[in-house]
């Protein structure tokens, strides 16, 4: 079981002394059990990391890891391009995590994730929720940001996490979320606008 500190470190899935990801995926698609076992070893930590960021607790993150590999195994014949495997895998994990997020009543996973961020990352996140031309007042606290983030729709929350917290490109987010880059830009714009509106209202009270 990974601890809170370890989930903040992304582990590169490929090591030079082992078979490449495309080689493993090709074997997996062709029913090579050892290739599937190796893919699980390579990616389970990364999926756990992503799920923990979204859901904020270890039990749910473990469930996402297990269900993701069950689903990827069942859908292995759908993998036509081995180069797209990582996005395909992360998309399955993200979609299942979103489903869990939606089932919660007053979910608090994102709050726990934000609590675990370093001070530097918290500052960066508070900057990124602002529009380019306007900056929120320095009195904005992470507690206020957490409350505001809980008001966003799940896909908007995930988009903010993937793009602004994890630093993924719009193309990567689009591949994982299975949408266009235009949709990612739209979700980011709407989410940031909502955050700014909510935070500005809170500060003006």
Image: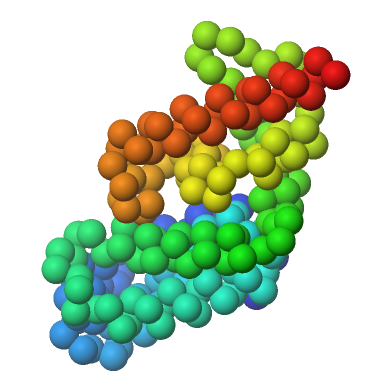
For the image, the number of numbered tags is 0
What residue do we see at 64% from left, 35% from top? 121
Q: Is 19 placed left or right of 199 in the picture? A: left
Q: Say which residue appears at 28% left-offset and 90% top-offset.
A: 33
Q: Is 73 placed above or below 118 here? A: below
| Residue 134 appears left or right of 58 | left
Residue at (47, 33) in percent of width and height: 188
Q: Camera-side residue: 5 or 149?
A: 149
Q: Position of residue 50 (x, y in %)?
A: 52, 58
When asked about the image quadrant of residue 22, the answer is bottom left
Q: Is residue 120 visible?
A: no
Residue appearing at x 35%, y 66% in the figure:
89
Give coordinates of residue 124: x percent, y percent: 61, 28
20 left or right of 39?
left
The quadrant of the image that shows the C terminus is top right
Query: Residue 36 in the image: x percent, y percent?
Result: 32, 83
């Amino acid at each position: 079981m990974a601890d809170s500190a370890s989930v903040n470190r992304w582990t590169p899935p490929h090591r030079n002394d082992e078979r490449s990801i495309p080689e493993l995926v090709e074997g997996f698609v062709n029913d090579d059990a050892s290739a599937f076992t190796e893919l699980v070893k390579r990616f389970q930590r990364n999926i756990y990391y992503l799920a923990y960021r979204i859901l904020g607790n270890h039990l749910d993150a473990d469930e996402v890891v297990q269900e993701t590999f069950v689903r990827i195994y069942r859908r292995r014949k759908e993998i036509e391009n081995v180069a797209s495997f990582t996005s395909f895998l992360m998309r399955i994990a993200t979609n299942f995590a979103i489903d869990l997020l939606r089932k919660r009543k007053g979910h608090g996973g994102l709050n726990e994730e934000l609590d675990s961020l370093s001070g530097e990352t918290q500052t960066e996140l508070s900057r990124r929720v602002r529009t380019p031309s306007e900056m929120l007042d320095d009195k904005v606290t992470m507690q206020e940001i957490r409350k505001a983030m809980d008001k966003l729709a799940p896909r908007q929350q995930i988009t903010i996490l993937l793009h602004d917290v994890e630093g993924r490109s719009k193309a990567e987010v689009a591949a994982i979320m299975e949408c266009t880059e235009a949709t990612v830009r739209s979700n980011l714009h709407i989410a940031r606008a909502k955050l700014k509106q909510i935070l500005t209202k809170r500060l003006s009270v």
